[in-house]
Image (cartoon, grey):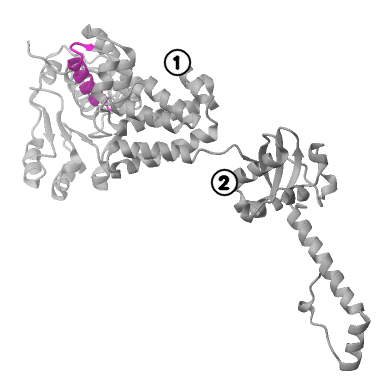
Amino acid sequence: MKYQVLARKWRPHDFSEVVGQEHVVQPLANALRHERLHHAYLFTGTRGVGKTTLARVLAKAINCENRQDFNPCGVCQVCKELDEGRFLDLIEVDAASRTKVEDTRDLLDNAQYAPSRGRFKIYLIDEVHMLSGHSFNALLKTLEEPPPHIKFLLATTDPQKIPVTVLSRCLQFNLKRLLPEQIYGQMAHILQAEGIDFEPAAVKAIAGAADGSMRDGLSLLDQAIVYGAGRVGLVDVQAMLGTVAGQSLHGLLRALAAGDTHRVLAKIQEIACFSVDFDRVLEQLLLALHRIALNQFIPQFLEDADEEADIAALFTPEDVQLFYQIALLGRRDLAWAPDPKSGFEMLMLRLLVFKPVAVQSVPDTSPKTENPSADTRPVVDAVKGGQSWAAMVTAMHLEGVTKQLAVNCVLEHLDAKACTLTLDAAHQSLLTPKRCEKLQDALQTYLGAPVKLVITLAKKALDTPAIQEIRKQQGLQQAAVAAIHSDPQVKALQDQFDARVLPNSIEPL
């Protein structure tokens, strides 16, 4: 017997066999039940989601001699002729190959004649957006005043290219991309019906690679059956798709969590031995990070996610979000790399370099006061004899911008485990991971303990060492000015020579 590919053999023959397009099937079913059929329907959506299939099922239901509620019976002469592609009153046109206005006019010349076999003469125009402007004008005249025995079923992947004058005369249905779970369910059903042995994980991998298209998924399934000599196994499917095994990807994530550059590069070399597509590997990495993020926020959301749960514990939520963003942007740049492997290695090194430090900024939860002062803040614990923060900053011998960060903070709490500072929000630009890391290193060296630094922001006046220093300098300046004006020699010079004191020339010693 002649072999028939799965996508054609398992094409739906009635509405009940259509997968994942309930939002389209329901209104069509109601229209058929109540005989409220429009003269023109437009089906839109990406490739392989069932646009043409739905149009053919609708054409069959419209002309079926013994319709079962809204479904075609499948056994009458009309249904048989439609299934066999020899029903005279269904005129199928591929607009991509018949774009000229002459073709459209020739097609519509017969629209005035009654159907020869069915109740309606149906024009099914696929990829209708490929028609020329003149062809659309020719079609528009018939759409405006259609004969009562004519129905138009249009399908397109690009409705934006269809003139609005045509769109306004059609009922438009947008078919959705299918979910991997929907594609997997249909493919598992087909394999069971065909008596083909398969591994669920392998079929799930194919469903993910189908990218929302049932037709693409079934084509890949055909390829996998041939590749595996009549069996659909995970190892064969991964080799066919150019993907890596889950354990290799999880090993890469564990090495990334440990910050181990040598292990990361070794895992990449191990993955490269399978001759994989690194764009697909990066796609798998993004999907894994997505699952890890879901596990961190809603652990019960995913099923069979024990491995993701273990890996999720190794990352902070901030790590996962940052890595996802870097990997997402890196996928765009992968095509520009000298070769995919080196581009992927640079991306992983980027993830290691930009791993967030332990310092974190959290919302301010301290009590709000009208005029806060250092006396009202928590007393520093007995570490280092309870020294003030200003004295600690001096003792740490900080320099540059790191010192500016420190002197614009106030000490909230200090013990052997953590040091909590509050930074004036006006100086938020000073707060960077590198400066925080330097400040934490200096603090740990000074205290002789692995103290974790936590910096919070406060949108209020703070009595920071910087403010204290400004207040001290202002006091010294005022004292110096007062001392000059009260000095007897200065007064004598003012009286005898009409001298005057220049304020800007006075500096405290």
Question: Is residue 24 visible to the viewer in this orientation of the structure?
Answer: no
**369, 490: nearer the viewer:** 490
In the image, farthest residue toward the bottom: 497
Q: Is residue 214 magenta?
A: yes
| SS type, badge 2 | helix
What secondary structure is the stretch in magenta mostly built from?
helix
Mark sitting earlier along the chain (2/1): 1
Against 150, residue 79 (above or below) is above
Q: Residue at x 27, y 47 (%)?
A: 164
Q: Dividing the image into 4 quarters, which one contains the C terminus?
A: bottom right
The x, y position of residue 224, in whole percent, is 22, 18
Viewer-proximal residue, 23 or 87? Answer: 23
| Residue lying at the far right of the rendered structure | 488
- Residue drawn at x 18%, y 39% as measured from the top left: 128
Pointer 1: residues within 10 angstroms few (<14), some, or many (20+)? few
Query: In this picture, which residue range is highlighted in magenta?
Result: 212-231
Q: Which residue is mark 1?
A: 304
Residue 187 at x, y percent in the picture? 27, 16
How many discs appear?
2
Position of residue 148 measured from the top left corner of the image (x, y, whole percent): 18, 33
Residue at 33 percent of width and 40 percent of height: 343
